[in-house]
Image (cartoon, rainbow, N blue to C red):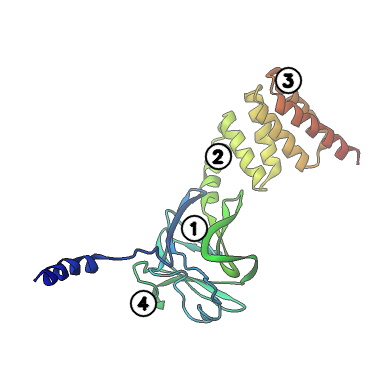
Amino acid sequence: MKTFILIVFLIPSFMMAQIDLPPASPDASWNHQLGFTQIDLSYSRPQMRGRKIFGALVPYDVLWRTGAGESTRIKFSEDIVFGGKLVKKGQYGLYSIPGKEEWIIILNQDATLHGDFGYDEKKDVLRVKVKPTNSPTTNESFTIELTDFKPDYSASLEMKWENTSIKVPIMSTADDRIMAQIQENLIVKKVENAGLLNKGAQYYFFNKKDLNQALEWSITSETLSVDNINYSVLTANILERLKRYPEAIESAQKALELARKKDMTDDVKNLEEKIKDLKIKKSK
């Protein structure tokens, strides 16, 4: 009788015993702002664990969920240019067809699938062909990230695993909005506001647009706010890019005088070096 009671008490403890292990392909997610666009991505990160990946575990020329577990999901808060093609804001399933010489990256309307089960090609929003490159380092975990950020609000959506790297160029549509605002405020209405003029000049300068127009706005911003060192520095930078070195030196010296008056030690040092560099360029 005692033996029977002992067994009865032991059975539940055996049934309840368990060993918890972390998932082989842990979930990951991130969000980035590119221009005015918020990008959210969620995916699973499978590991190499000593296995050959592309052309083996992940076969070539076959649809892949681009991760593990649930389908990889990417969401754009605004319209975006993805692989050179305009994509409407919304959430998409991110799929791919790996190839030895070329990959096909796919955005599909259905972001609710488990992996690629139930995938419908008719729901593809776009397909982009990209060339894989060899990664200098071995990536144990499958990784998707934004890289190659540029001043024009563009970047690369990079996928890497093993020794393979795939990059899809993406670009925010921020330029359209910014240029529309510049057109309305600075070109049509000709608003005389130092801050707005400086922003317009900066945008044209950093994005390599009309430098002569940028110079006009920058000079006007200086006349409206005579003690702003940043405005004079921008004018000097624009003149330097236009190779108008004597005028660039003059603007840099104006900025230097302002920096000295305001005891801006670091700016004084930087501007002194800049003037030396401009004088060298002028003499050539």
Q: Is residue 74 visible?
A: no
To which residue does mark 4 refer?
117
| Residue 197 percent location from the top left of the image | 60, 34
- Give the secondary structure at mark 4: loop
Of circles 1 and 2, which is in front?
1
Q: At x 59% / y 29%, what residue is drawn? A: 194
| Residue 75 percent location from the top left of the image | 42, 58
Of circles 1 and 3, which is in front?
3
To which residue does mark 3 refer?
260
Q: Given the current orientation, which residue lies at the most extreme front position?
A: 2
- Give the secondary structure at mark 3: helix
Q: Amino acid at mark 4?
A: Phe
Label 4: how many Cα within 10 Å (few below 14, some 14–19, many 20+): few
To which residue does mark 1 refer?
80
Q: Amino acid at mark 2?
A: Val
Report, in whole angstroms, how far the alpha carbon at label 1 lies from the one at label 3.
45 Å
Q: Quadrant of the C terminus?
A: top right
| Residue 79 percent location from the top left of the image | 46, 57
Q: Exactly how many numbered labels are in the figure? A: 4
Do callouts 1 and 3 mark residues in contact (Cβ within 8 Å)? no
Report, in whole angstroms, how far the alpha carbon at label 1 lies from the one at label 2.
27 Å
To which residue does mark 2 refer?
188
Q: At x 70% / y 43%, what residue is drawn? A: 211
Which badge, 1 or 3, comes first in the chain's sequence?
Answer: 1
Q: Amino acid at mark 1?
A: Ile
Do callouts 2 and 4 mark residues in contact (Cβ within 8 Å)? no
Report, in whole angstroms, how far the alpha carbon at label 4 lies from the one at label 3.
67 Å
Which badge, 4 or 3, comes first in the chain's sequence?
Answer: 4
Report, in whole angstroms, how far the alpha carbon at label 4 lies from the one at label 1.
27 Å
Could you say which quadrant of the image residue 233 lies in? top right
- Give the secondary structure at mark 1: strand
Of circles 4 and 3, which is in front?
4
